[in-house]
Amino acid sequence: MNFTHKFSIAALSFLLLAGGISAQQAKKKTAAPVKAKTSQKAAATSPGAAGGLPLDPEVLKGTLPNGLTYYIRKNGEPKNRAVLYLVTKAGSVLENDDQQGLAHFTEHMAFNGTRDFPKNDLVNYLQKSGIKFGADLNAYTSFDETVYQLPVPTDSVKVFQNGFNILANWAAYQTFDPKEINDERGVVLEEERAGGKNAEERLRNQTLPVLLNSSRYAQRLPIGKEDILKTFKPEAITSFYHDWYRPDLQAVIAVGDFDPAQVLSLIKNDFSSLKNPLNEKPRTYYTVPPTTGTVVKIATDKEFPYTLAEIIVKHPETIIKTPADYMQSIRIQLFNAMLNDRLNELLQKANPPFLYGQSAYGAFTGRQDAFTTLAVAKPGELETAIKAAVAETERVRQFGFTLTELERAKQNALLGVDNAYKERDKTQSAFFVGQYQQNFLTGGATPGVSFAYNYYINNIGKITLAELNAMAAKFVSDQNRVIIVEAPDKDKDKLPTEAALLTWIADAGKGLKPYIDYTTDKPLLDKLPAAGKTVSTQVDSLIGTTTLMLSNGVKVILKPTQFKNDQILINGYAFGGTSLASDQDYTSAGMAADIISGSGIAGFTQAELDKKLSGKNVRVSPYISDVAQGISASASPRDFETAMQLIYLYFTQPRKDQNIWDSNISQTKSVLATRNLDPGSIFSDTVSSTLSKHNIRGMVVTPELLAGANLDKAYAFYQDRFADASSFVFTLVGNFTVDQIKPYLEAYLGGLPATNKKETYKVLDVNPPGGQLTKIVNKGIGDKSTVELVYSGTYDYNEDNNVQMDALEAIMQIKLDERLREKDGKVYSPGVKASYKKIPDGRYSFTVYFECAPANVDSLVAETIDEISKIKQNGALPSDIQKFAVTEARSTQVQLKENIFWAGYLGSSSQNSQDPDAILKHVGDLDKVTPQSTKDAANKYLSGNNLIKFILLPEKK
């Protein structure tokens, strides 16, 4: 069972907050040319003149006379696209007492009226330009900064140039119309509801004052205070904007497929006239003061389903500016990797000591770093979890790491930087923005990938085992330490006292023995398989694919690309899956692939396999879905043969490991034991059980089903699913030539066993019930509701219908954003999701979902249905169809240059027996979307004949 709940509500949830609160979402006066201060390009491999690290030579950094900083970098991926960011060094810590929440509110108002884009005109303009609100156009507010992101096409000169004007409007020309402010209050309050009114928020309110030592950060969460958000005067927000949105605290970052000289001219033109306020306020930089000794906080909540402990030891912040800083950051990277490899090994025991454990040194907040240990315990086993997690750091402190561990960590670190270097001309523009943003906000160095590559190559070998072994003693301390325990209310009486907790931590280092690093030098394969041959070759010149038929029946679809330099994506499937398992054996069958993929391979345990693959850029995972079994894999060209060997072994020598099975059963039972405390989980379980007509194949596993599962059944089912390769279809996309990889395909895929059973999936009725149904779940103490409206039915899967369904999804999203969010202000982020499939039978579902106040559920459901009815009666507005078509066309242009798209598309085309060349007509097919076609689609798919309403309400008092 994948354990994906947000474990850490104190530190990790806090770090999410520190990352920001997201809003999702005048003709300019031409200034006289102004000379800007421009940095000189630095050498890529030598330190800067003052002994610091160099600036990335690919970026042009400078400062306008008014203090505004800019970063400009030409980058060709994706082609004809650019990302523009406005970064302001102003966040919630700068708010006055009567402004709490207004830094974030200001960010919202940027989309609700500026000098050149009154009211909601900006969002409307950008949607018509193919830029999606929320997904593309977005912003966030944190403690110390507010950041706006705007991706723009560069092949549309007007839209591209206007992008800089939009950034300038955000920076200096927001209008703050009182009516727009009042209209936006509801949206911001609903955002607060969406992120709160739950166990996480209630625990956060208990722990953050301790974690942040009652500092300014503890008193200025970005979302603010509800009473202020409801009642603040416009003067309060305009005062914040006047004081802190000023050019000497702002940066413009532009990365993309453009001419840097032109971009510099645009920045000068749009930003040189911005002025700093007279008598400007000094920008105060707050800190979290050190904690004297150790402070313990134990917090509980009725709805929190886990018991966890965090030990946070805070240290002064280090900003990487010099070669010495950079070297230390590499040491920390290696330390964290080795320590967590040891913690992960504990999860492979038959009875793991915790559900999840992690320790790492890294950035915290308030000018601090921290060494944090997190342990999520099984019910009633907090002491065991804490001692096991702490013991691994203590083991390092007492005995150190081994030389073999260090060498593997170095190999993996070099692998990462090597991949980045090889992909330096194929890296997405958004990757670089984050580096330049941190350079502006913190002064941290951004030397660039070429410098990083050369520095790692030349210096990582100088890092010694003694240096790494000394770090644990420096990180661990009983000073400036915070220990937090979070648990369900029901376990309050079972939790330790502060004294007992400190004793557990102190005792964790007693009686330890040195870590033994078990490794093996044996090869993955003892002998090569008997190779097959290619019996036929078919070339599709339109989309650049070659299809090989091998002598054992395996089909291989190849698409060589130059989209990535160091990537080959490999996927394989054959029909069957868990549909071929009986209900009695389904639980075992459903766990089979996860168990096998975590049990090692052939003669290797999982730990030994992980160590064997250190320094290799390869990933191979078998899977079994409801209708198919297959392989998902990727590799660099250098490690392609290793990927082929692993695929061969997962077919022919899967490994059965009782410890891994017992570990998974133990972990899953522990999670299920308290799952019913969480209202969201109960609601989700209700949705899944209803949509599957209470079929075990569509529901969350139960303890009773787990009790009937066993490893032998799971292993036998896996073996049966991979015993016959004759019906498998593999797709390979990436940097290769057909001639280069053909011998490997014939040797390893052609050498797979084939029995020609010609199996396929069974069609099982695991579909939503027909008719109209309302399911209400009363659970939770927070003033919060969740609504899902699910339309479903049979579906004729073809390109024409798929385009109409995609259009209906996008247009309904636009309409619900406009009505439920912008007009009503009663929902923060309504969502629409259309899905459709051909296999095992043609079905569709169309889901509308949102969170809101319980009192507004009925009216919002009615308004949603009213918006659907409008399309059923009149069809979509031409302007909304245009927004969909432009956005879809631009998205397709980008996708056609991505390996990940082609890997998925070629696989689905094969599974659905569709012509893969159809993608070349997709943009043209968008013209088939009309008001009449959307009207027909809405009446066909959203008739309401098959509609299930799921509603989560607070429990009745």
Image (cartoon, grey):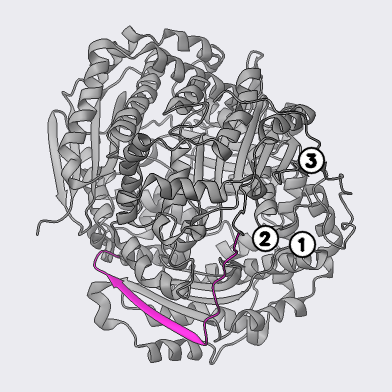
Q: Which residues are magenta?
A: 283-304
State whether residue 858 is above or below residue 222.
Answer: above
1 and 3 marks in contact (CB < 8 Å):
no
Question: Disc 2 marks which residue?
Answer: 612
Q: Is residue 4 visible?
A: no
The secondary structure type at the circle numbered 2 is helix
- From the viewer's side, name the closer residue of 816 and 685: 816
What residue is drawn where x is 37% and y is 19%? 797
The mark found on residue 321 in the picture is 1
The secondary structure type at the circle numbered 3 is strand
Type of residue at label 3? Leu
Q: Label 1 to label 3, Cα distance in Å?
A: 18 Å
Type of residue at label 1? Lys
- From the viewer's side, name the closer residue of 200 and 354: 200
The mark found on residue 860 in the picture is none
Q: State the image coordinates of residue 592 (x, y, percent, origin top left).
A: 41, 52
- From the viewer's side, name the closer residue of 129 and 561: 129
Which numbered disc flags the more N-terminal residue, 1 or 2? 1
Q: Is residue 285 magenta?
A: yes
Magenta span dominant secondary structure: loop
